[in-house]
Image (cartoon, helix red, strand yellow):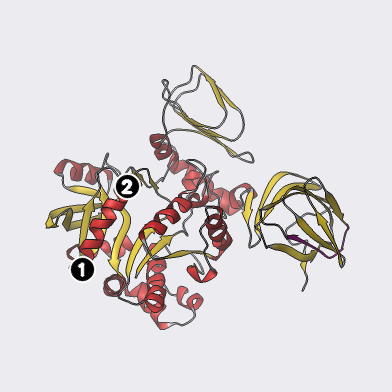
Amino acid sequence: MRVSLILAGGFGTRLWPLSRKDFPKQFAKIMGETSTYQQSLRRARLMADRIVVVTSNLYKYLAIGQAEEIGISLEESDLILEPERRNTAPAIYYSLMRISERYGSDSVTLLLPSDHVISNDSELLKAYSKALAAVNLGRAVLITVPPSRPEPGLGYVKLGGELMEGVSEVRGFREKPEFDEAVRMLEEGNWAWNTLIMVFRTSLMMELMEKTLPGVTDPIRRFDDIEEAYRYVQSIDVSSGTLSKVPERLAAVLSEGLGWSDLGSFESVYDLLQKDQEGNARSGRVRYSNSRNNLILSKRLVALVDVSDMIVVDDEDAILVMPKGSGQNLRELVEGMLEERLPEVMEHRVRYESWGTKTILLTSDGYEVSRLKLYPGRSLGPKRHFHRFVYWQVLSGTAKVTLDGSERILSRGEGIRIPLGAPHTLANVGRIPLEVIEIATGEYLGPDDVEFLK
């Protein structure tokens, strides 16, 4: 049995405002019409028999909903939900325990980060094929790429002699070296970047983690309640906690044409995007005069005059403007705004729910305009509000509205007003997604102005 384990629980502060606390970078559609999480799902479907996603409970419906958008059905049993973030090691070990119980300890696990970019999937498939062949050597196989620059934020793998065709032994592993050390490693040669894409027998990685990280594995094995276990679990990444300590149990496949990026900053986004003659990388409606080497990402019209080496990101409810190279300062700023609990940092305009998505289009004191999208067969409610009136207008699909016990079928162009305090349900009874404009007006529009009914 081949199982793909997708890591989807992180939060990238250096990609705000595209990445938010409740809508992190792996779910943001930064590089096109699909998120890196959705791209990872598509790869996993090609390479494994089963897909398992480990994420936070906060992102449960995000993970399921974005899978449904690309035609992949994820059941709740396919999700492993961490009670809180404790870095990659606890997430991986807890998931491997579940995979071992469900699919057997002899299963082969493909570990895929969900927040990385890969531009050449055919090269990934070739590397994966080589890694699969090497699993029987009793090693965890890392898929690596040649380093293009001294980058302190990544893991470095020292490649040794060939174990089999296309697969090397690992002589050393260094996680996040200092800049000067990274320069020396590149000068020395035979060092590669670790992509954290790994292939291994489930039992082997569990054994290695139990040997090197008892602070992670012991609490998870001791307590039946994972929330209780996570109170005692060490917060640490798997690279520094395990991989760097057992290079002799590792093997590596070097993939030179993978087109990989960890998408860790807007500078990495700039590197990946196509540039025009002035060196500008852009997405969206952009106009500029005498401006060079900028990154501009926008959903609205943005105009630049006499601007160079800047990053401009407009996500409609928040705008970022900063010089290139200021990623660390952005991270500190976002962390400060998180402490303030500013809604533009905590929340995204698009919210995924069990029934579909809600996109906030316009909001101010006393009103909120949203677009609701309900998947076929799903319903919202029954519920009622005590501080708002609601009006629903159908844009596409067929809706069944149950209002105070009475049913009504609405199609495109039809609408209905929901009075204050009236029990109501919105259901998609058609075979295509139901899209509805919702206009809410009232003195208080907080998220707790709702009573769900049985």
Amino acid type at circle 1 is Asn
Secondary-structure class at tag 1: helix
In the picture, measured across the screen, residue 26 lies left or right of residue 418, that is left
Compared with 387, 271 (above or below) is: above
For the residues labelled 1 and 2, say whether their Cβ atoms are less than 8 Å apart. Answer: no
In the picture, measured across the screen, residue 450 lies left or right of residue 78, that is right
Compared with 427, 105 (above or below) is: below
In the rendered structure, find residue 136 and report the number of the disc placed on it: 1
How packed mark 2 is, by other alpha carbons closer than 10 Å (few <14, some 14-19, many 20 or more), is few
Residue 425 among magenta residues: yes
Give percent across and percent down for residue 424.
82, 63
Q: Nearer the viewer, residue 415 or 27?
A: 415
- Can you tell which of label 1 and label 2 is closer to the viewer? 2
Amino acid type at circle 2 is Ser
In the picture, measured across the screen, residue 14 lies left or right of residue 412, that is left
How packed mark 1 is, by other alpha carbons closer than 10 Å (few <14, some 14-19, many 20 or more), is few
In the rendered structure, find residue 122 and report the number of the disc placed on it: 2
Q: Nearer the viewer, residue 376 or 323?
A: 376
